[in-house]
Image (tube, rainbow, N blue to C red):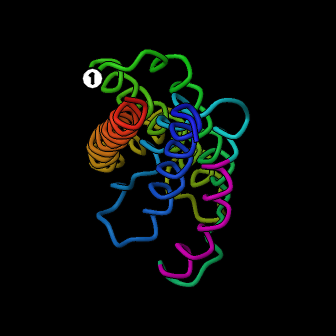
Amino acid sequence: MSNQNNSRNYAIGLTVLSALGRLVPHAPNVTPLGGSCLFAGSRIAGPLAYALPLVVMLATDPIVGAAAGGHSGYTSTSPVIYASFLISVWIGRRVVSNVTGMRVGLAAFLCSLQFFLLTNFAMWFSASRSAVPFYTPNFAGLVSCYAAALPFWGRTLAGDLFFSAALFGMYAWLSQRVATAENRVAV
């Protein structure tokens, strides 16, 4: 198996394993999924980078929902959540094509920020139009929603930074080990 094939297999394996990490007990909003999407965008070519995190989300949402209290796992905001994770894959493609610690950190920050902005807008929109509105359907209600979500954004950002660093670090370590082993065999 060539080094390039190993690298692709490692990238796919790390993406799937990290995305499945959302099934492991964790603090609210501190999951490897954001980092997994960023990593997939950076390291997996073609539509597979988008498909892997999406398939994992679709497959695990019912499990996560059942563990959280018996609902299906899919909500009115699920399409926005999925779209946000796909944007994170896109950010990985654009920002982390050349991996440096600064680029990975910046990309993880951007992923967390767009997730916060998009998903909380969707939450406000949905909650302000329900039968018993939780937020008022105006700018003050939107600001209130974002303010209430700030602690969760801090956790999301911490998780995205940590898991992005871990994924890119493990990938570099595995790739280097394989290259070293192939060089020993070739000599």
The residue lying furthest to the bottom in this view is: 70
| Quarter occupied by residue 62 | bottom right
User: Dot 1 surroundings within 10 Å: few (below 14), some, or many (20 or more)?
Assistant: few
Q: Position of residue 17 (x, y in %)?
A: 48, 58
Examine the rendered structure and indicate whether residue 156 appears above or below residue 42. below
In this rendered view, identify the residue nearer to me: 142 or 2.
Answer: 2
| Quarter occupied by residue 174 | top left
- Confirm whether the magenta stretch covers residue 29: no
Q: Position of residue 144 (x, y in %)?
A: 39, 43
The residue lying furthest to the front in this view is: 187
- Confirm whether the magenta stretch covers residue 62: yes
Question: At x 59% / y 44%, what residue is drawn?
Answer: 122
Q: Position of residue 55 (x, y in %)?
A: 68, 56
Question: At x 59% / y 68%, what residue is drawn?
Answer: 60
Question: At x 57% / y 84%, what residue is drawn?
Answer: 70
Instruction: Judge whether residue 33 can be spotted in this image.
Output: yes
Is 96 on the left-hand or right-hand side of 158? right
Quadrant in which the C terminus is drawn: top left
In this rendered view, identify the residue nearer to me: 72 or 48.
Answer: 48
Q: Which residue is mark 1?
A: 101
Quadrant in which the N terminus is drawn: top right
**At label 1, which amino acid type do we have?**
Gly
Is 103 on the left-hand or right-hand side of 94? left
Is 1 on the left-hand or right-hand side of 109? right
Instruction: Judge whether residue 147 can be spotted in this image.
Output: no
Q: Secondary structure at mark 1?
A: helix
In this rendered view, identify the residue nearer to me: 48 or 30.
Answer: 48
Segment colored magenta = 52-67
Question: At x 40% / y 25%, what residue is drawn?
Answer: 107
Total numbered circles:
1
Dominant secondary structure, magenta: helix
